[in-house]
Amino acid sequence: ELRSASLKVAQEALAQCEGYGQRCVRFLLGALQTSTVQARADAVHDAVWMLYKVSKGSDTARAWILQADGVLVVQAALVANSGESELLENGIWLVYALDGVHGFAQVLQRSQGDSGPELAVRSSLCWAVYELTCGGKHRAPEVMQE
């Protein structure tokens, strides 16, 4: 009886942790979605950094981000903040951390226009591909390693 009660309490606690984790992911993605309307670049950068850390630290959290169309949310935030070169670079590495080259393909599909912001996103993505292939190794930007 004690064993089954302990198991039930542990399952409830894990379910609560999972719920709070998903809530955190939704909050961060919501912050990025808001950034497409109006936000300070440093707040957007903070959300990108946190999502990067969460996605690198947990396959489960990465799956939650992907299920919530996180790559498309990041792409839209990058287009909206295309004048921030460091944010572009970090956002592209976030996309790679989330879904690898498949994520890169999604960003390219969504950034096909001729506008300056879309060109800036594609350019940043090209540099990341260059770094992955010709640079000889994958390196996350220094700010993402903090």
Image: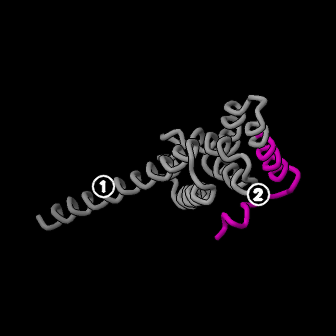
Residue 142 x, y percent position in the rendering: 72, 67
- Residue at 62% across / 40% down in the picture? 76
Kindly identify which residue carries mark 2: 138
Q: Is residue 65 above or below residue 47?
A: above
Q: Quadrant of the C terminus?
A: bottom right
- Residue at 20% across / 59% down in the picture? 8
Disc 1 marks which amino acid?
Answer: Ala
- Residue at 17% across / 61% down in the picture? 4
Question: Label 1 neighbourhood size at 10 Å, few (<14), some (14-19), many (20+)?
Answer: few
- Horizontal relation, residue 44 to residue 115: left or right: left
Disc 2 marks which amino acid?
Answer: His
Residue 114 x, y percent position in the rendering: 78, 29
Residue 100 x, y percent position in the rendering: 67, 45
Label annotation for residue 83: none
Q: Is residue 104 above or below residue 136?
A: above
- Element under label 1? helix
Q: Quadrant of the N terminus?
A: bottom left
From mark 1 to mark 2, how far is it between C-alphas?
35 Å
Kindly identify which residue carries mark 1: 15
Mark 2 or mark 1, which is nearer the start of the sequence? Answer: 1
- Element under label 2? loop
- Residue at 48% across / 47% down in the picture? 30
Give the magenta range.
122-146
Closest to the observer, 3 or 13: 13
The rendered magenta stretch, by its main secondary structure, is classed as helix
Is residue 129 covered in magenta?
yes
Among the 4 quarters of the image, the one containing residue 103:
top right
Is residue 11 covered in magenta?
no
